[in-house]
Image (cartoon, rainbow, N blue to C red):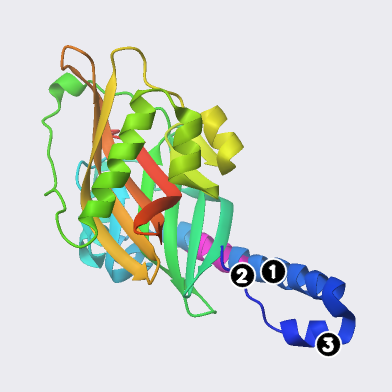
Amino acid sequence: MKQLTRFLTLCLLLTGVSALTGCNEGENAASDLDVMELVEANLNNFEETWATGDGSLLGAFYAEDAVRIASNRQKPLYGRKAIADHFDLGFEQDANDPQLSLKLVAARSVGNDLILAVGEWYGTSERKGAWFNLYQTDGASVISLFDNAMTYNPTNDLSQIERVFDEEYVGEGSDMVNRAIERYDSNLNAGNIEALAEQMFEVDGIQVTQNGIFQGHEELVAGIAPPEDGVTFTAQGYGYLPVADDLVLNWGGYHAKNNEGALLAFGQWGNLLRIVDGDIILIVEAAGVYSGN
């Protein structure tokens, strides 16, 4: 990750190489603290606004062209208005007073005034899950460019659900996306979880799923479960959005089927990736099973 390096020259002149390292560490810690404070303030405001039950107010937390993925939908939400309308629909369907608590697990700058954050949410009736957000910051506040929220351990009767698909993405970067999907699916379906973590994720990469939040290769290898015998996962891309010279957002859908072709699970994913030598590698992977509620 790119870190701020202000005052490096001053540190070098004053105290030499060893002091330079110490100055860097202190500065990075301060920067990380600032990032955490910015995100925490945003989450606190979001919780307070959620309690009003007004989707239009919640929409103000998102950029005009933001993308949101929610586990109770089969297709992404595109734009602030669609996101706000979806919140309003949820409030109308929930007879109880709206309740939401948000926990921040990790947040860090990825450069270019962008901040990634992951955490957990807690709602009514013991419902809970995880989330990933990519924010843009002006130094005083943040606004969401991309949001992916999923439910922990959802239960669903898929036989009663009619599948809905978004249009498969074929534009800029689609070759990189398709290569990455092929590598990911191949390693996952073969049970090569260590290879998946090493080939597909940065060293401090993060996965956010209905099974929890895993950070770094060691946690990824321990936490990612290979599919059961006879089960195959397949993914497809829905969208691709460059957010910096070497950073992109990429999202899509996936499903799992057995040898007989029976649908076992499906959902959506939305990732932050870095372009490296003509390919993309995961900074954050966020994938949730369709929850239907």
Q: Where is residue 64 in the image (x, y as percent from the top left)?
A: 27, 72
Q: Where is residue 133 in the image (x, y as percent from the top left)?
A: 43, 57
Q: Mark 2 points at which residue?
A: 3
Q: Residue 28 carries which label?
A: 1
Position of residue 169 in the picture relative to residue 234 (left or right): left
Q: Which one is earlier in the sequence, the residue at label 1 or at label 2? A: 2
Q: In this view, does 284 lie above or below 219?
A: below
Q: Nearer the viewer, residue 140 or 281?
A: 281
Nearer the camera: disc 2 or disc 3: 3
Q: Could one spot residue 136 in this view of the protein?
A: yes
Residue visible at 35% across and 37% down in the picture: 184
Residue 196: quadrant of the picture: top left
Q: Give the secondary structure at mark 3.
A: helix
Q: Which one is earlier in the sequence, the residue at label 2 or at label 3? A: 2
Q: Which amino acid does label 1 sit on?
A: Asn
Determine contact: label 1, label 3, CB under 8 Å.
no
Q: What stretch is highlighted in magenta?
A: 37-45
User: Disc 2 to disc 3, how far (Cα)?
Assistant: 20 Å
